Each structure stands twice: as structure tokens, then as C-alpha cells.
């Protein structure tokens, strides 16, 4: 049985976060530890977009977590925890978080993307589209086609960029080589490999 079929069966073809029935896709929870088989959830495009673009967050949409955080599916709980943590300045998400108890393994999984980790305010931290911290030497993959400034070249979506270096003055920039040319890449358009 395909993963998509299995998840449609499990969720009754509803978004496992907000119960929408529109535009459902399989979402693989980033940074799932090895050994965990159920690493995917079925979610709608609204949820996916907001998980991947923290700038477009609509806090009210995530009131749905009130119910879905009690899901029996660990991968759903993990995403609920990450989104509540991202929104906790709103107040109510913190109240929900306070009710959510995880075993050590699940908590480590939830925290793996660095969501909610207190940062030294002066420290520049580079994060990919999922909020995963990037460091010099990491490899990333481009998640969209990117025109390269000052040339006619387009760095294609899906291109792997190995051994990036981070810009120590700007948290949004990393550099890496594509087709032998050193280019500047914006962190929100990459995913850590
Ligand atoms: Zn949804």
C-alpha cells in the first residue's frame, strides 16, 4: 500500500492538523530520527504553506491544534509542538504547550529543528526553510529556481550545494558553488541535506 493511501485511510482523508479536506498531500516531518517508521502526515496546502513559510503564519488557523495536538500519531504531535512553539508569543499556544507531555524521545524529535531554542540575541543563526540550523560545511538543496545575480544563469530547484559557507554578518545569506560558480543563496530557499 502506498504511503499516501495509508495516510488517507488513517486520517479519513482529512488534514491531520486542521481537518480540511482540500488539497491534501503527504508531508514528511523534517529531521525524523532514524528508526521511526511513521514519519509522515497527511496535511492540507494551507498547513503546509504555513509550516514552510513562517512569515505567512496566520495564528488563528492554528487554533486547530487545540484538537489535533491530542492525536495518537506521534508525527502529528511533533508538528503540533513545533507550531505551538513558533506561535507561543500569542499566549494561548503556550497554554496548550503546557498541557502537552512528551517522552524524551518524542521531545528530542520535536526539538530537532531548533524551534523554540532560546538564542543568544547577538548570535547570527542561519536556518533553512524548515528552521533547521545551517553551518559552514553543510550541504543543502535548492527548493526553487533561483536567478543568479549578475549572470543569465538559473540555479535549478533540486540542485544540491555542498559545503556551503554562512555569511557571518547576515542570517539570511549563505554561499556555495553551483556549476563551479560561487553564488549567494538566501537561506529560506534551501533545505538542509
Ligand atoms: Zn490543514
Image (cartoon, rainbow, N blue to C red):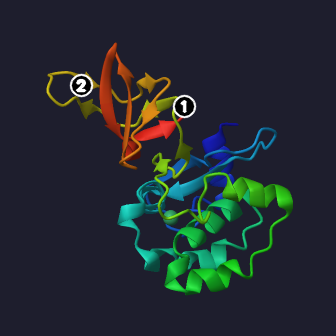
CA gap, disc 2 and disc 1? 22 Å
Residue 101 x, y percent position in the rendering: 80, 73
Q: Say which of marks 2 and 1 sits in front.
A: 1
Local crowd size for mark 1, using a 10 Å CA cut-off: few (<14), some (14–19), many (≥20): some
Q: Which residue is mark 2?
A: 154
Q: Is residue 177 above or below residue 19?
A: above
**Residue positioned most to the right:** 103
Q: Earlier in the sequence, mark 2 or mark 1?
A: 1
Horizontal and vertical percent position of residue 119: 56, 62
**Residue 2 position within the rendered picture, expressed as x and y whole percent measured from the top left:** 65, 37
The answer to whether residue 142 is left or right of residue 35 is left
Quarter where residue 174 is shown: top left
Q: Marks 1 and 2: in contact by CB < 8 Å?
A: no
**The C terminus lies in which quarter of the figure?**
top right
Horizontal relation, residue 33 to residue 144: left or right: right
Q: Circle 1 is placed at which residue position?
A: 138
Residue located at (60% from left, 66% from top): 118
Q: Residue furthest top?
A: 180
Give coordinates of residue 182: x percent, y percent. Answer: 32, 22
Q: Which residue occupies 24% across, 25% down?
A: 154
In the depicted view, which residue is nearer to us: 54 or 49? 54
Residue that appears at 52% across and 52% down:
131
What secondary structure is found at the residue carrying circle 1? loop
Whether disc 1's CB lies below 8 Å from ligand 1 is answered: no
Who's the residue at 58% across and 80% down the image? 93
Amino acid at each position: 500500500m502506498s504511503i499516501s493511501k495509508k495516510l488517507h485511510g488513517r486520517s479519513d482523508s482529512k488534514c491531520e492538523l486542521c481537518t480540511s479536506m482540500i488539497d491534501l498531500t503527504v508531508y514528511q516531518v523534517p529531521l525524523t530520527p532514524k528508526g521511526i517508521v511513521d514519519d509522515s502526515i497527511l496535511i492540507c496546502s494551507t498547513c503546509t504553506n504555513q509550516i514552510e513559510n513562517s512569515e505567512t503564519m496566520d495564528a488563528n488557523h492554528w487554533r486547530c491544534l487545540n484538537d489535533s495536538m491530542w492525536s495518537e500519531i506521534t508525527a502529528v504531535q511533533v508538528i503540533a509542538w513545533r507550531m505551538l512553539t513558533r506561535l507561543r508569543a500569542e499566549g494561548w499556544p503556550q497554554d496548550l504547550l503546557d498541557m502537552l507531555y512528551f517522552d524524551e524521545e518524542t521531545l528530542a524529535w520535536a526539538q530537532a529543528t531548533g524551534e523554540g531554542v532560546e538564542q543568544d540575541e547577538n548570535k547570527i543563526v542561519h536556518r533553512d526553510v524548515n528552521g533547521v540550523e545551517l553551518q559552514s560545511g553543510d550541504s543543502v538543496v535548492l527548493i526553487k529556481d533561483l536567478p543568479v545575480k549578475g549572470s543569465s544563469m538559473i540555479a535549478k530547484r533540486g540542485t544540491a550545494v555542498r559545503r556551503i559557507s554562512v555569511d557571518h554578518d547576515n542570517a539570511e545569506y549563505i554561499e556555495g558553488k553551483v556549476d563551479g560558480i560561487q553564488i549567494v543563496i538566501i537561506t529560506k530557499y534551501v533545505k538542509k541535506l
